[in-house]
Amino acid sequence: MKSYIYSLGRPAAVAVLVALGALLLPQTARADRCDDLAKDLKNGIDGIKIGQTAAGTVYLAHPKAREITLGCSSKNFSNQLFGKTDRKPPPAFVDLMASAAAIVFTLPKDDMARGVTRCYRRLGIFRGDDVASRYRRLDMRCARTKTESSITISRSKDQ
């Protein structure tokens, strides 16, 4: 190798050594886009705490929700927000989900509040206890059981 570097000439040899040195230096860690979104949620909403990250899902905690998660990019969707609360969601939970969806999907909060409220209002005798709808190019799915209700907001990969 020594003879090969000398045959290249001094400027080329320096360039080869610099390139090898750059390859061998440790790479700086880059934050995941999903972790950045979780930090934005923490900074934008009071009382939210970031929990564990497992299998592309960041578990969050907030006093107004029983469960709240942020799903990261996968084959079918770019981002997904899931929240679970009592059977009849209190206005504070609707506001929490609207605020979180506004941050994750970069849409106005009042539009997201309208979409979340609309999704929950569709639950009932005529449409059933599991309703899927579209609002502002987002897929919203509201479901309820005898004790709790949940909402899933996601954006498809193709949009």
Image (cartoon, grey):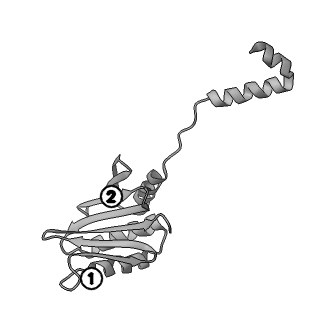
User: Which is nearer the eye, 72 or 62?
Assistant: 72
Image quadrant of residue 48?
bottom left
Picture coordinates of residue 55, whole percent (x, y): 35, 48
Kind of residue sitting beneath label 2: Thr
User: Which is nearer the eye, 72 or 87?
Assistant: 72
Identify the mark nearer the N-term, 2 or 1.
2
- Give above or below for 37 relative to 93: above
- Give above or below for 44 relative to 16: below
- Residue lying at 49% horizontally and 68% vertically, measured from the top left: 106
| Residue at the spot of label 2 | 69
Picture coordinates of residue 82, whole percent (x, y): 32, 63
- Residue lying at 84% horizontally and 22% vertically, measured from the top left: 8
Picture coordinates of residue 151, whole percent (x, y): 29, 69
- Residue lying at 79% horizontally and 17% vertically, measured from the top left: 4
Image quadrant of residue 143?
bottom left
| Residue at the spot of label 1 | 121
Kind of residue sitting beneath label 1: Arg
Q: Residues within 10 Å of mark 2 (few under 14, many from 20)?
A: many
On screen, residue 86 versus residue 122, left or right, reads left
On screen, residue 23 versus residue 81, left or right, reads right
Q: Residues within 10 Å of mark 1 (few under 14, many from 20)?
A: few
Distance (Cα) linking label 2 and label 1:
22 Å
Q: Secondary structure at mark 1?
A: helix
Picture coordinates of residue 30, whole percent (x, y): 53, 44
State which quarter of the image contains the N terminus: top right
Q: Are marks 2 and 1 in contact (CB under 8 Å)?
A: no
Q: Secondary structure at mark 2?
A: strand
- Give above or below for 144 relative to 47: below
- Residue lying at 20% horizontally and 82% vertically, measured from the top left: 124
